[in-house]
Amino acid sequence: MAAVVGALSAFAVQGGAQADEHEGDTQILKVVVNGGRDIALGTTEAKKFTLQVTASDDSGIREDFTVPSLWNGTKGLVIPDNPTGKCVPHAGAPTTSTCTYRMTLRPRIDPQDNTTAGTWKADVAISGNDGDYMGKDAAATVQVRRNAKATVNAAPEPVKKGKTLTVTGSLTRANWETYKYAGYTGQPVKLQFRKKGSSAYTTVKTVSTGSRGALRTDVKAATDGYWRWSFVGTSSTHPATTTADFVDVR
């Protein structure tokens, strides 16, 4: 048993095994990070999320014997805040359990630098009560992306119908090396409009961000409504949509 514990601990600390390890009938059935959603990480606030492992063994899953970790393949390693997790047997199927671990991603510690934005891998090892075990490299993935922020301002307010309305704003994103937000230049951002009384936005045009992430364009004022900027994101940067700016057209 001590040898198995050592092997599983090494699996986590090294950030992934060279190949999946398996002994006996233990099976890792499903691994989900952050409920299947991307993680947007800023410059100061730590992000708390869960890693869930569903596994089976004919003797049941041993709660204090699981070893998950999350890493990006080259740098950065996150291990659970609660190493033993909380394993709950499935109703009517006690040989299958879902184990939940609470994890924290800290922008000043875990990403290390901006190159770590992108796909992070969850490596998992789990054991049955009878000593059987399974270790799986890259059992699940999650996108850890630099948080983005966008602002909007439509002017003048109010505006006469048919006159020019200027919509400005900016797009910035977190820098994990300076721990500040900086302009994200050369990015396509959608200018969207929602007519007063409607619940749906339509895209009016797409504008590329300029110096320091600046946004600016002119449109003709036609009717009362709400204006916003919407950025779909990139492989390294999370999407961002501004709050709406209402303009009264007279």
Image: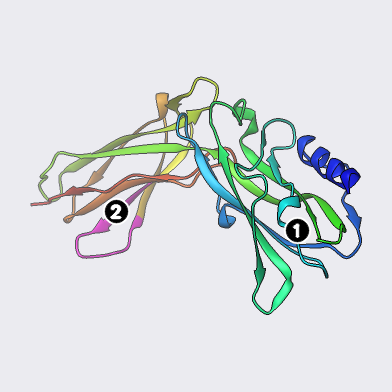
The residue at the point 82 percent across, 45 percent down is: 8
> In this rendering, would 215 be left or right of 218?
right
Q: Is residue 76 or residue 186 the one in the foreground?
A: 76
Q: Which residues are magenta?
A: 190-202
Mark 1 burial class by Cα count in 10 Å: few <14, some 14-19, many 20+: many
Residue 167 at x, y percent in the picture: 26, 39
Residue hosting label 2: 193
Q: Which amino acid type corresponds to the residue marked 2 in the rendered image?
A: Phe
The residue at the point 59 percent across, 56 percent down is: 36
Say whether disc 1 or disc 2 marks the residue closer to the N-terminus. Answer: 1
* Element under disc 1: loop
Residue 240 at x, y percent in the picture: 42, 44
Residue hosting label 1: 62
192 in magenta:
yes
176 in magenta:
no
Residue 156 at x, y percent in the picture: 14, 39
Q: Say if mark 1 contacts mark 2, CB within 8 Å.
A: no
